[in-house]
Amino acid sequence: MEAHGLTDIQFWLGFFNIIILDIILSGDNAVVIGMAARNLPAHQRKKAIFFGAGAAILLRATLTAVATYLLKIPLLMTVGGVLLLWIAVKLLLEEEEGTHVSVGANLRSAIKTIIIADVVMSLDNVVAVAASAHGNIFLVLFGLALSIPIIMWGSGLVAKVMNRIPWLIYVGSAILGYTAGTLIVEDPYVSKTLLDGQEGWITGIPIILAILVILIGYSIKKAMGKHKTA
């Protein structure tokens, strides 16, 4: 049976699985890029989105090549999840930073945040796509190619919408918190040694972390606001 044959059921299952996974998982990357770039002037925002999306695709291509090795590193996904939690709160707090920071510095800061988040968030995408592809290099490349327009278009849309509806920044941070929780519970070490058979915690941890990100971010912003008015 040919690898790409029309009668290859596993190929087509992988094909459609990758489309769904890319829409869901690339959406997370689009959210973080849009959040990080939302406060930049229009021309700077386009640069941040371009470099951020480019970094995401490059990272995915690189990580795909070493996905099997990465999965053998204990607690790697958990460390990535914790780092993503920090980024989710940081993006919430950036709204409190004054406009005295130069545009150049803001652009560098946005791109740095995007790249760090992309490293973390590309882990789940690469693992999911590699698993769905079942070793089929065509499907792996298809998954990478499909994620490009999703991230580019999605991040630009997120940035525009968040500028018009500021409270959506909390929704974005909650999505990142949930993604961080998913990374942690799907870490092979955590799932096998700590959460084996604990379906309630596997479902609940991402939800709890999404809520915690909002509460912590809101509390710190409120405290910062009181400090400024004092």
Image (cartoon, helix red, strand yellow):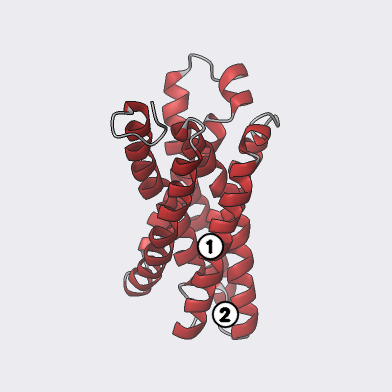
Estimate the x, y position of residue 206 in percent, counting from the top left.
46, 37
Q: Residue at x 61, y 37 (%)?
A: 67
Count of picture labels: 2
172 vs 14, nearest the viewer: 14
Q: Is residue 138 visible?
A: yes
Which residue is tagged 2? 98
Q: Is residue 86 visible?
A: no
13 relative position to 109: left or right:
left
Q: Residues within 10 Å of mark 1 (few under 14, many from 20)?
A: many
Q: Position of residue 129 (x, y in %)?
A: 47, 39
Mark 1 sits on what residue? Answer: 91
Work out which residue is located at the far front of the displayed protein and give it: 1
The image position of residue 199, as x and y in percent, is 43, 20
Q: Are marks 1 and 2 in contact (CB under 8 Å)?
A: no
Kindly give the residue lying farthest to the right in the view shown: 73
Closer to the eye: label 1 or 2: 1
Q: x, y (%) of residue 185? A: 53, 30
- In which quadrant will I find the C terminus? bottom right
Q: CA distance from mark 1 to mark 2?
A: 14 Å
Q: Secondary structure at mark 1?
A: helix
Give the position of the N terminus as an image quadrant: top left
Q: Earlier in the sequence, mark 1 or mark 2?
A: 1
Q: Amino acid at mark 2?
A: Gly
Look at 38% across and 46% down and name the residue there. 24
Q: Is residue 189 above or below residue 175?
A: above
Q: Nearer the viewer, residue 229 or 98?
A: 98
Residue positioned 33% across, 28% down in the render = 8
Quadrant in the picture for residue 52 = bottom right
Amino acid type, callout 1: Leu
State left or right for residue 162 relative to residue 215: left
